[in-house]
Image: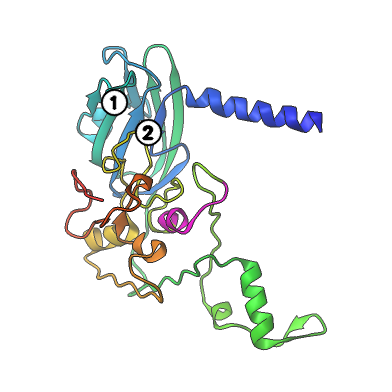
């Protein structure tokens, strides 16, 4: 027992020590599609000297890769913490990208994996999401609906005959146990986020309207392919799972009247909750 506690304390200590270095969004091991738009942000642990700050992507200055420079925030939220923010960027070439950040004293490296898509093959795609559904739920439904004899189900569910199926791990960036907003956001954007967040990385700022945003798959399909997108749900459209396909939502927005819906603007610079 003592060894287990010691190992757990060591793991937590590593996590804490890592948090004292820079925080980079998108996060380590993020997976992106070519051409997908996102906001790039570096949060420094303390005050940083812009003359000593260096940010490179695959060995080149980040501004060359993205085609524009970021805004340096000397005191974010008026505190002794600096940040670098660049909105609405994308990567056009597939491959592995190594991002290295240093403030002259501390450094951190992370990796992004960028994927290309092949030529369009299907005319239409229908994505069914079983909200909160695990293999155990499907087994229970199958047994109740079809029955079982001698260890074998007496029939299959309609979902069992679907041609393509996938399971997604739903742990979030801040919790192993997630919620509908975070997990649906992972479906819609390919990015892990914090509990209650949709389409954004929940950063450290107090302002819930300025979190780094990532583009949804529905927005990408409309913008790049001119496709129409429809959402059908047996709950309210603003419920977390369907809303994650069209909205950007910060945990700090809880209780607000509206959410940011990216219909006419992919990444609006001044969104409203």
Q: Are marks 1 and 2 in contact (CB under 8 Å)?
A: yes
Residue 136: x and y in percent read 66, 68
Residue 69: x and y in percent read 21, 29
**Residue located 66% across and 74% down the image:** 139
Residue 234 as seen in the image, left or right of residue 12 = left
Whole-angstrom CA distance, mark 1 to mark 2, is 9 Å
- Return the mark for residue 30: none
**Who comes first in sequence, dot 1 or dot 2?**
1
Residue 241: x and y in percent read 41, 63
Q: Which residue is mark 2?
A: 204
Residue 260 lies, with reference to residue 53, above or below; the image says below
Classified by dominant secondary structure, the portion drawn in magenta counts as helix
Q: Which residue is mark 1?
A: 76
Residue 55 as seen in the image, left or right of residue 10 = left
Q: Is residue 155 visible?
A: no
- Nearer to the camera, 257 or 41: 257
- Nearer to the camera, 257 or 144: 257
Q: Quadrant of the N terminus?
A: top right
Question: Image quadrant of residue 207?
Answer: top left
- What's the magenta region? 176-186
Q: Does dot 2 land on a helix, a strand or a loop?
A: loop
**Residue located 32% across and 49% down the image:** 253
Residue 96 lies, with reference to residue 70, above or below; the image says below
Q: Does dot 1 land on a helix, a strand or a loop?
A: helix
Q: Residues within 10 Å of mark 1 (few under 14, many from 20)?
A: some
Q: Residues within 10 Å of mark 2 (few under 14, many from 20)?
A: few
Residue 185: x and y in percent read 41, 55
């Amino acid at each position: 027992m003592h060894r287990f506690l010691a190992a757990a304390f060591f793991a937590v200590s590593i996590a804490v020590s890592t948090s004292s270095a820079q925080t980079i969004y998108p996060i380590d091991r993020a997976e992106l599609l070519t051409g997908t738009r996102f906001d790039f942000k570096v949060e420094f642990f303390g005050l940083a000297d812009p003359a000593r700050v260096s940010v490179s992507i695959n060995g080149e200055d980040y501004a060359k890769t993205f085609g524009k420079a970021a805004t340096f925030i000397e005191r974010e939220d008026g505190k002794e913490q600096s940040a670098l923010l660049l909105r609405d960027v994308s990567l056009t070439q597939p491959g592995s990208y190594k991002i290295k950040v240093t403030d002259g004293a501390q450094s951190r490296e992370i990796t992004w994996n960028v994927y290309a898509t092949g030529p369009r093959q299907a005319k239409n795609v229908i994505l069914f999401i079983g909200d909160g559904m695990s293999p155990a739920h499907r087994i229970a439904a199958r047994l109740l609906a079809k029955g079982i004899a001698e260890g074998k189900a007496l029939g299959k569910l309609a979902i069992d005959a679907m041609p393509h199926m996938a399971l997604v791990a739903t742990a979030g960036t801040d919790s192993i146990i997630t919620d509908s907003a975070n997990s649906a956001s992972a479906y819609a954007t390919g990015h892990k986020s914090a509990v209650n967040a949709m389409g954004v990385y929940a950063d450290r700022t107090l302002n819930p309207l300025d979190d780094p945003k990532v583009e949804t798959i529905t927005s990408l399909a409309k913008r790049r392919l001119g496709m129409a997108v429809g959402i059908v749900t047996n709950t309210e459209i603003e419920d977390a799972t369907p809303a994650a396909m069209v909205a950007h939502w910060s945990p700090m927005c809880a209780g607000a009247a509206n959410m940011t819906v990216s219909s006419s603007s992919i990444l609006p610079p001044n969104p409203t909750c």
